[in-house]
Image (cartoon, rainbow, N blue to C red):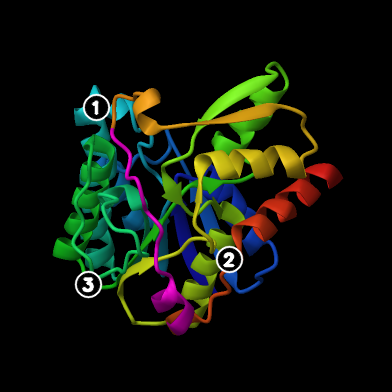
């Protein structure tokens, strides 16, 4: 039996992990979240690790309020940087393999070809900088880790772009969406399956990996397809980033090259439209 701790157990990715592990009899998974387990509280973490035998820890906990992070930088760094440091030190001490979820926001978006894991990060705001510091703390304090960067995560759970669009469609006849930020929407259920593949592989090919659904589109394109697949009638107007100012800068292009994770773990990379369609079926049948 493989024993796993999932931190951030109430978030959308953890909810998707719950769905995936239902079908994995060889996994014993404990989903923990606030207030019972806080990665910024090292004493609380130490108590858990001392009282539980673990093989893996999957860290889904994060401060993800991108714009608010510009004001709440101390909080963002506590959760996204110091928390992973605490976790890394304890995983190293107790010989637990860590799978940590990171983000495309560690990149500056200046490229126009998919980003490799080897390229130098250059975050544009506090959120990305705090997540990058978390990555580096893990790399400094432990050896057996997988850092998985992902992008534009959405699912039937939690708060995300897809659910926001569907909510707006109930009250609005028209909406304006940014059309000059390019990335890859990623279904959290697909990412959850990839994470469990890493666990079941027992691989020691540690390091940084990129995982997203395939295809490079804008937020505007994504919104249009969401409304189309869910049968919503709403006019979507494309606008430029400069016409929709936000507290934090976003990368203009954050498409991730997923060759490494495909080759190492034989992960299936679904195209974004197919995965969105999968959610429409789930919602329709729920």
On residue 70, the disc is 1
Residue nearest the observer in this picture, 180 or 82: 180
Mark 2 or mark 3: which comes first in sequence? 3
On residue 143, the disc is 3
Residue nearest the observer in this picture, 12 or 170: 170
Q: Secondary structure at mark 1?
A: helix
Closest to the camera, between mark 2 and mark 1, is 1
Range of magenta residues = 249-263
The picture quadrant where one finds residue 98 is bottom left
Seen as rendered, the residue at the extreme top is 171
Q: In the rendered image, which residue does mark 2 sit on? A: 193
In the visual, does 215 lie left or right of 285? left
Report how far apart the C-alphas of labels 2 and 1 lie in the structure. Answer: 32 Å
Say above or below: 145 vs 35: below
Q: Quadrant of the C terminus?
A: top right
Location of residue 65 in the rendering, given as x and y in whole percent from the top left corner: 37, 31
Q: Secondary structure at mark 2?
A: helix
Residue at the spot x=61%, y=63% of the render? 271
251 drawn magenta = yes
Residue at the spot x=78%, y=43% of the render? 283
Location of residue 6 in the rendering, given as x and y in whole percent from the top left corner: 46, 54
């Amino acid at each position: 039996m493989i024993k796993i701790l999932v931190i951030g157990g109430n978030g959308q990715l953890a909810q998707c992990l719950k769905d995936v592990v239902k079908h994995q009899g060889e996994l014993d998974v404990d989903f923990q979240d606030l207030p019972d387990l806080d990665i910024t509280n090292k004493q609380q973490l130490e108590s858990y690790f001392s009282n539980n035998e673990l093989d893996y820890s999957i860290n889904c906990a994060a401060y993800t309020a991108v714009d608010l992070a510009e004001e709440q930088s101390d909080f963002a760094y506590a959760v996204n940087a110091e928390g992973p440091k605490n976790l890394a030190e304890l995983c190293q001490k107790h010989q637990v393999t860590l799978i940590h979820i990171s983000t495309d926001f560690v990149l500056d978006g200046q490229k126009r070809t998919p980003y490799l894991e080897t390229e130098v990060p250059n975050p544009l705001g506090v959120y990305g900088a705090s997540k990058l510091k978390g990555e580096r703390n893990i790399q400094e304090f432990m050896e057996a880790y997988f850092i998985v960067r992902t992008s534009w995560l959405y699912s039937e759970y939690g708060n995300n772009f897809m659910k926001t669009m569907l909510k707006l469609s109930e009250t609005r006849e028209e909406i304006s969406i940014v059309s000059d930020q390019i990335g890859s929407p990623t279904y959290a259920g697909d990412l959850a399956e990839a994470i469990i593949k890493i666990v079941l592989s027992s691989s020691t090919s540690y390091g940084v990996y990129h995982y997203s659904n395939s295809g490079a589109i804008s937020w505007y394109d994504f919104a249009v397809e969401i409304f189309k697949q869910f049968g919503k009638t709403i006019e979507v107007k494309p606008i430029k980033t400069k016409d929709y100012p936000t507290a934090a800068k976003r990368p203009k292009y954050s498409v991730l090259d997923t060759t490494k994770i495909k080759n190492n773990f034989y992960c299936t990379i679904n195209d974004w439209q197919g995965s969105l369609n999968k959610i429409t079926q789930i919602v329709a049948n729920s």
